[in-house]
Protein backbone atom coordinates (compact mmCIF):
# COMPACT_ATOMS: atom_id res chain seq x y z
CA UNK A 1 0.00 0.00 0.00
CA UNK A 2 1.21 3.46 -0.87
CA UNK A 3 0.07 6.88 0.28
CA UNK A 4 1.05 10.28 -1.01
CA UNK A 5 3.15 12.54 1.14
CA UNK A 6 0.87 15.47 2.11
CA UNK A 7 3.75 17.90 1.60
CA UNK A 8 5.41 16.87 -1.67
CA UNK A 9 2.88 14.23 -2.89
CA UNK A 10 5.68 11.69 -3.35
CA UNK A 11 4.46 8.09 -2.97
CA UNK A 12 5.20 6.71 0.49
CA UNK A 13 5.07 2.98 1.22
CA UNK A 14 2.78 2.50 4.20
CA UNK A 15 4.89 0.15 6.28
CA UNK A 16 6.68 0.13 9.63
CA UNK A 17 9.86 0.97 7.70
CA UNK A 18 8.34 4.29 6.67
CA UNK A 19 9.06 5.98 9.95
CA UNK A 20 7.62 9.33 8.92
CA UNK A 21 4.45 8.14 7.18
CA UNK A 22 2.28 9.65 5.88
CA UNK A 23 5.24 11.92 5.15
CA UNK A 24 8.00 10.67 2.84
CA UNK A 25 10.78 11.92 5.10
CA UNK A 26 11.55 13.70 8.32
CA UNK A 27 11.98 16.87 6.27
CA UNK A 28 8.38 16.82 5.08
CA UNK A 29 7.18 15.99 8.59
CA UNK A 30 9.10 19.00 9.91
CA UNK A 31 7.70 21.19 7.13
CA UNK A 32 4.22 20.17 8.24
CA UNK A 33 5.03 20.90 11.89
CA UNK A 34 6.72 24.15 10.86
CA UNK A 35 3.61 25.28 9.02
CA UNK A 36 1.58 24.75 12.17
CA UNK A 37 4.15 26.60 14.25
CA UNK A 38 4.24 29.34 11.62
CA UNK A 39 0.47 29.75 11.79
CA UNK A 40 0.64 29.96 15.57
CA UNK A 41 3.31 32.61 15.35
CA UNK A 42 1.29 34.59 12.78
CA UNK A 43 -1.85 34.43 14.92
CA UNK A 44 0.00 35.23 18.15
CA UNK A 45 2.36 37.81 16.64
CA UNK A 46 0.09 39.90 14.46
CA UNK A 47 -2.27 41.34 17.09
CA UNK A 48 0.71 42.13 19.32
CA UNK A 49 2.44 43.98 16.48
CA UNK A 50 -0.73 45.84 15.54
CA UNK A 51 -1.76 46.58 19.13
CA UNK A 52 0.27 49.76 19.52
CA UNK A 53 -0.71 51.46 16.22
CA UNK A 54 -4.33 50.36 16.69
CA UNK A 55 -4.46 51.76 20.22
CA UNK A 56 -3.00 55.02 18.92
CA UNK A 57 -5.49 55.08 16.05
CA UNK A 58 -8.41 54.56 18.42
CA UNK A 59 -7.16 57.38 20.63
CA UNK A 60 -6.79 59.64 17.59
CA UNK A 61 -10.25 58.71 16.32
CA UNK A 62 -11.77 59.29 19.76
CA UNK A 63 -10.04 62.68 19.95
CA UNK A 64 -11.37 63.54 16.49
CA UNK A 65 -14.89 62.36 17.33
CA UNK A 66 -14.80 64.38 20.56
CA UNK A 67 -14.32 67.45 18.36
CA UNK A 68 -17.12 66.45 15.98
CA UNK A 69 -20.69 67.60 16.59
CA UNK A 70 -22.91 64.83 17.96
CA UNK A 71 -25.01 64.66 14.78
CA UNK A 72 -22.00 63.02 13.07
CA UNK A 73 -23.59 59.64 13.96
CA UNK A 74 -27.19 60.57 13.06
CA UNK A 75 -27.28 59.27 9.48
ZN1 LIG B 1 7.42 14.52 1.15
Image: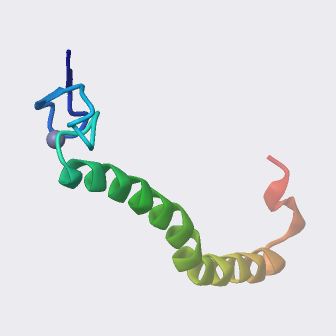
Name the one closer to the observer, 1 or 5: 1
23 versus 58 height, above or below: above
Kindly identify the residue that appears in the image at 51 percent across and 72 percent down: 45
Side of 8 relative to 58 (left or right):
left
Q: Position of residue 68 (x, y in %)?
A: 79, 74
Q: Quadrant of the N terminus?
A: top left
23 versus 31 height, above or below: above
The single residue placed furthest to the left in the displayed view is 10
Q: Position of residue 52 (x, y in %)?
A: 60, 84
Q: Position of residue 75 (x, y in %)?
A: 79, 46
Name the one closer to the observer, 8 or 25: 25
32 versus 54 height, above or below: above
Kindly identify the residue that appears in the image at 21 percent across and 33 percent down: 5
The single residue placed furthest to the front in the displayed view is 16
Kindly identify the residue that appears in the image at 26 percent across and 43 percent down: 19
Kindly identify the residue that appears in the image at 50 percent across and 61 percent down: 40
* Residue 2 falls in image quadrant: top left
Side of 60 relative to 18 (left or right):
right
Side of 3 relative to 75 (left or right):
left
Side of 10 relative to 67 (left or right):
left
Name the one closer to the observer, 36 or 68: 36
Name the one closer to the observer, 68 or 53: 53
The single residue placed furthest to the right in the displayed view is 70
The single residue placed furthest to the top in the displayed view is 1
* Residue 60 falls in image quadrant: bottom right
54 versus 34 height, above or below: below
Amino acid sequence: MEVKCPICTKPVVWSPQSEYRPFCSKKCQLIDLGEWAGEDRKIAGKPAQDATPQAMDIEEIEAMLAQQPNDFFKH
